[in-house]
Amino acid sequence: MDKSTEQESKEQDFGEKPTSVRESDHYQDEYVPGFVDKWDELIDWESRAKGEGNTIINILKERGVKKVLDVATGTGFNSVRLLQAGFEVVSADGSPEMLVKAFENARQYGYLMRTVQADWRWMNKDIHEEFDAILCLGNSFTHLFNERDRRKALAEFYALLKHDGVLLLDQRNYDSILDQGYSSKHAHYYCGDSVSVYPEHVDEGLARFRYEFLDNSVYYLNMFPLRKDYTRRLLHEVGFQEIKTLGDFKETYKENEPDFFLHVAEKE
Ligand code: SAM
């Protein structure tokens, strides 16, 4: 089998006991080409952009941000929105498949995306510039399964920011999933109608989400259920001075209500 055929037929493999897969490196095997291709069906860009509004762009503009590093580019949604809004953007991801897809998506919107393949834990090896802002969005940080990896990644992000830089990092409201069970209004991220998303298994160390598409294909992501205050504490501990956490893009909310939290972490 030649390499490209091998790539296309690559399937997700969680082994015999999927709920025992709790590794930071496993994301590379989870975002297989079939899933990556369907990802944009899952995240309907137009309704997602409508749901999000301009919160992120406004946060960046208010701070006079010009140069942004998107560390979790995925298929490119956040990077392309920023390019459209006139920011200078470098788009990084640990997965080469994701970057290929993101580059193609950006080209369709008329942009030549600047991509870098880099793992969060060793970003400074591959990226030698400083940024006004770093984005880690789309519930991406949840892919790290141990605290050492989380601290390492956040320290790498911190080092890539200018002295007055800001990190925008979001996550699902896992507190509510762990304590109350899953309920999503699908308002912000999973707004394509063509997919059903739910956590098949949840415990303090794993949230295993199942994604079923209209053609009955099924994929999974194994993620670490970050509690909100734990993420805030880690951000403080790596050196971020000021951390504001929005719930579904609003400043005031009841703890159980939002589907997503957005942490806005300032370096000074
Ligand atoms: N931000 C995009 C969005 O909101 O549409 C999607 C992000 S996708 C949910 C998560 C991305 O994080 C994947 O593309 C995956 O390859 C990347 N990723 C996960 N762990 C990583 C790591 N340790 N280093 C670099 N990238 C990683």
Image: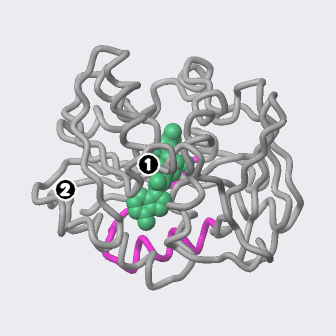
Name of the residue lying farthest toward the right: 181
Residue 163 horizontal/vertical position (percent)? 15, 61
Q: Which mark is residue 2?
A: 1
- In the displayed structure, would residue 201 be above or below residue 50? below
- In the displayed structure, would residue 59 be above or below residue 119? above
Q: Amino acid at mark 2?
A: Asp
Would residue 92 appear left or right of 197 to someone viewing this image? Answer: left
Name of the residue lying farthest toward the front: 1
Q: Amino acid at mark 1?
A: Asp
Q: Nearer the viewer, mark 1 or mark 2?
A: 1
Residue 121 horizontal/vertical position (percent)? 34, 72
Q: Is mark 2 within 8 Å of ligand 1?
A: no
Residue 171 seen in render: yes
- Looking at the rendering, the stretch of residues picked out in magenta corresponds to 227-246
Q: Secondary structure at mark 1?
A: loop
Would residue 96 appear left or right of 162 to someone viewing this image? Answer: right
What residue does disc 2 label? 164
Looking at the figure, which quarter contains the C terminus? bottom left
Residue 244 seen in render: no
The mark that comes first in sequence, 1 or 2, is 1
Residue 83 horizontal/vertical position (percent)? 28, 26
- Identified at 85% across, 47% down, the residue is 183
- Identified at 32% across, 58% down, the residue is 266
- Identified at 64% across, 53% down, the residue is 11
> Along the line of sight, which residue is nearer the eye, 251 or 52?
52
- Which quarter of the picture shows residue 109? top left
Q: Secondary structure at mark 2?
A: strand
Residue 13 horizontal/vertical position (percent)? 67, 64
> Along the line of sight, which residue is nearer the eye, 110 or 67?
110
Magenta span has 193?
A: no
User: Pointer 1: residues within 10 angstroms few (<14), some, or many (20+)?
Assistant: few
Magenta span has 239?
A: yes
